[in-house]
Image: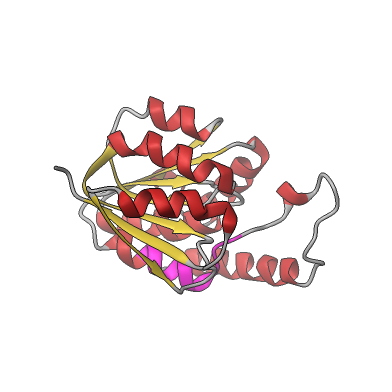
Amino acid sequence: MDEKITTVLDAYHELIREEHAKPREAPVGEQDRRLRAVGPSTGQLINIIARSLKAPIILELGTSFGYSGIWLAEAARASGGRLITMELHDYKSAFAREMAEKAGLADYIDFMVGDAVQMIEDLKTGVDFVLVDLWKDLYLPCLKALRPKLNDGAILVADNISPGREDVRDYVAAIRIMPDMKSLPLPVGQGLEISRYKAA
């Protein structure tokens, strides 16, 4: 990675450290303004996987403040691909765009703002890699919307899939019984579910 990207990642890591120093429970109305990032280990892993694909269309569900998008956009640039990143809140998307511009990666990213399920349904292209990291009650609806958009061999990485988490149980159960999916948990970061789609 070049110096622009490492400088931006270092800035994010400082923000993450500041976030971890705050009380875990956010005040009412402030929960969505907290920086909830995948962390360096998960960032490196998704970068490695996405980089291994040839000219992939990468879809990020949950731009948030843009940390994971830097890892994914670097992979898109390196592999001749493109990142589409979706976020409900325009202020988060704007922050992420600004950081991507500082990293020299904004030209490889399409920033979309709105309802994730609707935006997935409106996609005009198939996707090769997906990071699922948004509100947990949207994991399963997004999976259902995604399935017709997946290219053969597409890889899905869902974050925050730790053992015993009730709020992602439906997603995990659904993806593990899909006959065209191979899926397994991975104890990286906050827990991942990595799945690969094989068209019938």
- Residue farthest toward the right in the current orientation of the protein: 27
Horizontally, residue 74 falls left or right of residue 179, namely right
* Figure coloring: secondary structure
How many numbered discs, if any?
0
Horizontally, residue 24 falls left or right of residue 45, namely right
- Determine if residue 165 is in view: yes
Examine the rendered structure and indicate whether residue 59 appears above or below residue 43.
Answer: above
Q: Quadrant of residue 29?
A: top right
Examine the rendered structure and indicate whether residue 72 appears above or below residue 85.
Answer: below
**Residue 150 covered by magenta stretch:** no
By secondary structure, the bulk of the magenta-drawn segment is best described as helix
Horizontally, residue 86 falls left or right of residue 73, namely right
Q: Quadrant of the C terminus?
A: top left
Residue at figure coordinates x 49%, y 45% from the top left: 139
Question: Residue 147 placed where, x, y %?
Answer: 32, 38
Residue at figure coordinates x 29%, y 48% from the top left: 178
Residue at figure coordinates x 48%, y 49% from the top left: 170
Residue at figure coordinates x 47%, y 27% from the top left: 118
Q: Who is closer to the viewer here, 145 or 48?
A: 145
- Determine if residue 105 is in view: no
Q: Who is closer to the viewer here, 90 or 171?
A: 171
The region drawn magenta spans 37-47
Question: Residue 187 placed where, x, y %?
Answer: 45, 74
Question: Residue 159 placed where, x, y %?
Answer: 49, 59
Q: Quadrant of the N terminus?
A: bottom left
**Residue 46 covered by magenta stretch:** yes
